[in-house]
Image (tube, rainbow, N blue to C red):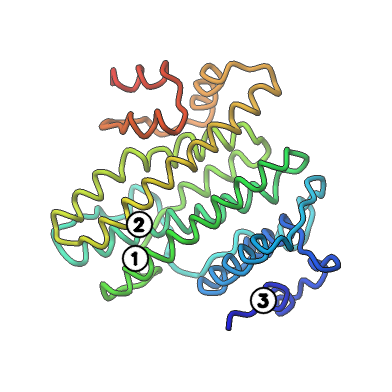
């Protein structure tokens, strides 16, 4: 039987998370964020979700974790491997060989693992937001954990495991650059880097299916479906931040893309998915013209 979340948390030395008979969501998210063990991180996600469904989790939106020793020294929790290098130095991945398909699945697993930590980080980092913000990003973290588990299981079935191939740290590098601003984080991570997955997933899915990896293609299809919702949340909370500051979202995004030297977007674009994720027609029209 799976251990209950308080037992798991107690083993890690966080008894302060237990408040009477309930856990506090953001404090629990900090524990999951700090966990570096892959299997333990997944178990914590499952256990916390079970507590939420049982109505045993409360929410404190005001608490600041920015000076918490765990947050400043142990986050994000991630294993020693994979080796991280510049995106320019990561070998190209081709689907015609088993090793190439392993590397493709590994690269996607690395993105999904980072996405778990990114969702947890915004829950812990940014205080004083509407309740819905934290529940939204917990759902993202839990779904990203599910995606990672699917990819890792498939990778193991292919004779490899997460950590066997080098990877780049572009997602987390951008998260660090935007650590002090909710609007900047939403613009540059979900709205830019994660939105590229909406464009890339159909191509990867088709390559895997053509190479005979039906299971891998099906997993990518699941991820594409869910990522539309995740990017939509990035759009929702980016617009919220713009409204707080009386900013035009389209103009503000353009300014931030220039400020952070966002990667130049290249076709093909999945305009249908981007539209479903809430991008403005003005933006989609500009992409269609590239």
Percent across and percent down for residue 171 are: 48, 47
Q: Are marks 1 and 2 in contact (CB under 8 Å)?
A: yes
Q: CA distance from mark 3 to mark 1?
A: 33 Å
Q: Pointer 3: residues within 10 angstroms few (<14), some, or many (20+)?
A: some
Look at the numbered disc 2 and give the secondary structure of its residue: helix
Front disc: 2 or 3: 3
Front disc: 1 or 2: 2
Q: Pointer 2: residues within 10 angstroms few (<14), some, or many (20+)?
A: many
Percent across and percent down for residue 30 are: 69, 60
| The N terminus sits in image quarter | bottom right
> Which residue is label 2 attached to?
107
Number of the label disc, if any, that sits on residue 4? 3
Residue at position x 57%, y 51% from top? 139
Number of the label disc, if any, that sits on residue 165? 1
Number of the label disc, if any, that sits on residue 227? none
Percent across and percent down for residue 233 are: 54, 38
Q: CA distance from mark 1 to mark 2?
A: 8 Å
């Amino acid at each position: 039987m799976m251990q209950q979340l308080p037992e798991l948390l107690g083993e890690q030395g966080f008894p302060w998370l237990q408040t009477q008979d309930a856990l506090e969501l953001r404090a629990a998210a900090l524990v999951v964020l700090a966990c570096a063990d892959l299997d333990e991180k997944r178990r914590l996600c499952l256990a916390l979700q079970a507590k939420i469904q049982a109505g045993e989790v409360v929410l404190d939106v005001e608490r600041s974790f920015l000076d918490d020793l765990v947050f400043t020294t142990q986050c994000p929790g991630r294993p020693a491997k994979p080796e991280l290098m510049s995106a320019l130095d990561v070998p190209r991945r081709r689907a015609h060989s088993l090793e190439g398909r392993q590397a493709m699945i590994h690269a996607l697993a690395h993105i999904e693992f980072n996405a778990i930590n990114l969702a947890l980080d915004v829950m812990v980092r940014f205080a004083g937001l509407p309740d819905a913000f934290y529940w939204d990003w917990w759902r993202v973290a839990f779904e990203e954990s599910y995606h990672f588990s699917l990819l890792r299981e498939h990778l193991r079935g292919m004779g490899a495991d997460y950590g066997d191939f080098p990877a780049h740290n572009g997602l987390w590098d951008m998260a660090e650059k935007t650590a002090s601003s909710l609007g900047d984080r939403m613009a540059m991570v979900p709205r830019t880097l994660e939105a590229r997955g909406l464009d890339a997933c159909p191509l990867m899915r088709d390559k895997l299916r053509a190479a005979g990896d039906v299971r891998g293609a099906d997993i990518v299809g699941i991820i594409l479906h869910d990522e539309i919702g995740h990017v939509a949340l990035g759009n929702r909370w980016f617009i919220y931040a713009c409204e707080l500051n009386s900013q035009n979202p389209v103009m503000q995004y353009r300014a931030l893309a220039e400020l952070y030297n966002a990667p130049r977007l290249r076709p093909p674009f999945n305009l249908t998915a981007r539209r479903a994720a809430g991008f403005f027609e003005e933006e989609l029209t500009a992409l269609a013209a590239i």
